[in-house]
Image (cartoon, grey):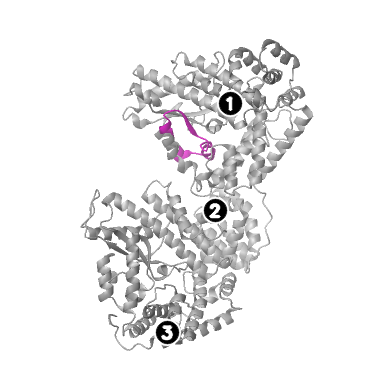
Amino acid sequence: MTLAARITRLPIAFDPAAAADLRADLPGFAPGVMDLMAATAGCSPYLRGLMLREADWLREAVEAPEAALATTLSAADTLTVEALPLALRQAKRRIALLAALCDLGGVWPLETVTGALTALADKAVHLSLTTLVAEEIRRGKLPGARPEDAATAGGIVALAMGKMGAGELNYSSDIDLICLFDETRYPGEEQEARASFIKVTRRMTAILSDATDGYVFRSDLRLRPDASVTPVCLSMAAAEAYYEAEGRTWERAAYIKARPCGGDLAAGDRFLKTLTPFVWRKHLDFVAIQDAHDMRLRIRDHRGLHGPITVEGHNMKLGAGGIREIEFFTQTRQLIAGGRDPGLRDRTTVGGLAALAAKSWIPPEVAGDLTTLYRAHREVEHRLQMVNDAQTHSMPTSPEGVARIAAFCGQDEATFRHGILDRLAATDRLTEGFFSPSEVEDGPQLSDAAREITKGWESYPALRSDRAQTIFRRLRPRLLKELAKAANPDEALVALDGFLAGLPAGVQIFALFEANPTLVELIVDIAGSAPALARYLSRNASVLDGVIGGSFWGDWPGVAALRTELAARLVPAPDYEGRLDMARRWMKEWHFRIGVHHLRGLIDGFEAGKHYADLAEAVVQVIWAEVTADFARKHGAMPGRGAVLIGMGSMGAARLNAGSDLDLIVIYDDQGVEGSDGPRPLATRPYYSRLTQALVTALTAQMPEGRLYEVDMRLRPSGRAGPVATSLGSFTTYQESEAWTWEHLALTRARALAGEPTLAGEVEAFRRGLLVAKGQGARVKPDVAEMRARLQAAKPAQGAWDAKNGAGRIMDIELAAQTCALIAGSPARSVERQIAAGAGRILPVSDAQTLASAYRLLWQLHAAARLLSERALDWESLGEGGRAFILRETGAADAVALAADLAQAVTGAEAAVMRLVGKADGETGDGTG
């Protein structure tokens, strides 16, 4: 489509005489195009000169602007190094003219205008590098390189930074480049290669920047590592070492937009991938806010840009309310959360704002307003530069100059002034509050004991650095004010003190709290209710990222969604150990989420039990996949049909508490195959034994992020004496002819978690059949009675508040429930369903109701107690917040009422279990009768 058919706006000719002269000098253009050209000439001497010089080309270009752009970009593709500079300058003139007219006439949106300018810069850099390297190869200056290596510039790559990297070049932009070379292509000859590439880089800069009949792009190489002392081209290894050791926040922000634009693009992509951990931190990085704020102030100090916003002389890029404010706002938010969410890693400012809004990091209306403001600012910036092709971002200092820019924007001066001041003020309002640190508030009055505790904070490891102390001074009054709202402020302060004392470092966590006041409320709530959880947080503070960076307060997603999320989270990890460590971090975040939801009453103990089990199941399934894949790479695929992982005990019943370990067994079916066929093959039995050991290690090993779960495999056939993995044949034979009654009871809760689906189905079918057959044995109840006696002798109740151990408590009721399921031949796994399977048949309905009611109370008490502490519940040592939590969970009015309810439930349950199984009267049998 022609230019004329798409014109939607026009400048106003500031110099009518210049506009009239252009009409006279260039007849023959369509009326709409001529109106646009004349008005442009009346505002910009530079563009008037380009129109006169490129008039013949322009007559064709306005008929099909996009085609003209494509043709111009490809015109220099096959030129020699001698012809390249002038050809690129001609391309620059033409694309600058075309982009300006399409911008001023409203034909192209901002992104197309900046995209056209960036495409020219990419082409110019790439052609310069490949052509110059071809010349170096022809002259034998690049060691070992062949002519075909010129296509990838022999391993040198230019990284486009800043606006060029984002495809956002402004009208008279310089281009920021970092030039690196892949030293691995020149083993033992790196120095010779480096010398050649330094020469190429300097010659490229001359081709692009020297003012010979104009220039292509002013080039800036100062963003490279330690630019004051390093050559213009470095090896990738040297650059990577610098960023690992000395990289700063502004360099991380710069690499958000980094993009290979010329030379060996594949090598550039590989380099950027190696920098991912440097740019995108795995934790939420709120320290970046302070860094960005400090950088803004340094820029303003350097440029003398402080003071009130005025139109004359205002810097549209760096001044208050300007373009850089929006860019910093966007990039800082991306740095904070982009390490956890790759979806936020958009190079463009507008795209970054949209991604942040889509992930709820900023309100959609803020993203929309800033996008509109950004585009408006960029259009004004372009017109400032179009006047004389000047690399300026500042408004003119005279009223006449401002009037010219107003006309260039198609507005009268008064309307323009009003609009630009409104937009600058709106930008400042939307961004300033995000960056500026809060003032130090006055804190509450403290008791003598509280003052003594807080005085000790100065000596804690978390407050060693000046920076941590600065942030904490602003945070401290807010913490103390929240503590004053706790049920018992002194108890909460002691718990908070334990949290602070356990922090190994403070800058990140204090910055996180300062930027997110709701976290201060949460940590004080936890300190006041569950001091043990507060101490856990001090060792695992990164779990707080999940409160800010995801749907922490949303509905529970379920096993399938958790499994999918964890698998996706592991993808960026570089190796097997990295994936295991990443899984630990992820699990802790979700584990903490469950605990907080329970503590705040969003879920009760039974929902928490299911959530903990769902989380463990998702983790086990993903880790099983990781372990089996890693093992297969070393030793080959599983011999035969494969293996299945079975959850036993509470894991099989899908009800865990905050401190549960996992009872697991592995069953495999080799189908007669004697061994694996991988790089290091193993015989079948050692294969599955070592695979199982690898799984246990993957779950239990202490890594930088801790461990996943403790694992207990004693419920496998023959317990500790048996192999860690059991063949299907051995398993079925053992269960049918050798297993004790307690092992059949354990099978009532067995559940396949992961592994080969048909084998899982076969094991489940066997389990169901076995329960029907073995539940009719004469020795079932006597064996259970004997086992019950031994359990109570070995694990008696640890006081009146013990909900788990002892007669009439959780383990006793679970034993009775499993007995019901075994005798009834029921496949049910949960306590409630197992008791229901026996109601009216194996035990009176009244006893079933007594057991179920007692179990509900005991589980709520147990689940709450395990969240508060790993030790046995001691009511006297609980703080007021912890006591209130337990009373809320159990529905009791006070401690006296709860103790009475507990005693009644235990007594009733003990009697019901006794009526079910009777007293122990001898040795246990093998349960085969």
Where does the image place residue 269, in percent across and percent down from the top left? 43, 35
Q: Is residue 238 above or below residue 563?
A: above
Q: Which mark is residue 277?
A: none
Q: Which mark is residue 173?
A: 1
Q: Which numbered disc, 2 or 1, marks the residue that appears first in the sequence?
A: 1
Q: Type of residue at label 2?
A: Gly
Between the residue at mark 3 and the residue at mark 1, the CA separation in whole angstroms equals 86 Å
Q: Residue at x 68, y 39 (%)?
A: 427
Q: Type of residue at label 3?
A: Arg
Q: Type of residue at label 1?
A: Ser
Queried whether the magenta region covers residue 326, the answer comes back as no
Q: How many labels sit on residues? A: 3
Q: Quadrant of the N terminus?
A: top right
The part of the image, by quadrant, that contains residue 198 is top left
In the picture of the structure, the residue carrying the numbered disc 3 is 841
**Badge 3 element:** loop
Q: Residue at x 65, y 56 (%)?
A: 477
Label 2: few (<14), some or many (≥20) within 10 Å? some
In the picture of the structure, the residue carrying the numbered disc 2 is 550
The part of the image, by quadrant, that contains residue 644 is bottom left
Asked if the residues shown at circle 3 and circle 1 are in contact, with their CB atoms under 8 angstroms apart, the answer is no
Where does the image place residue 921, in percent across and percent down from the top left? 33, 89
Q: Residue at x 45, y 50 (%)?
A: 568
Instruction: State whether residue 218 appears in this view.
Output: no
Of badges 3 and 1, nearer the viewer stands 3
Q: Which span is picked out in magenta?
A: 243-268
Q: Quadrant of the C terminus?
A: bottom left
Q: Nearer the viewer, residue 300 or 752?
A: 752
Between the residue at mark 3 and the residue at mark 2, the CA separation in whole angstroms equals 49 Å
Q: Is residue 301 above or below residue 547?
A: above
**Badge 2 element:** loop
Q: Nearer the viewer, residue 210 or 18?
A: 18
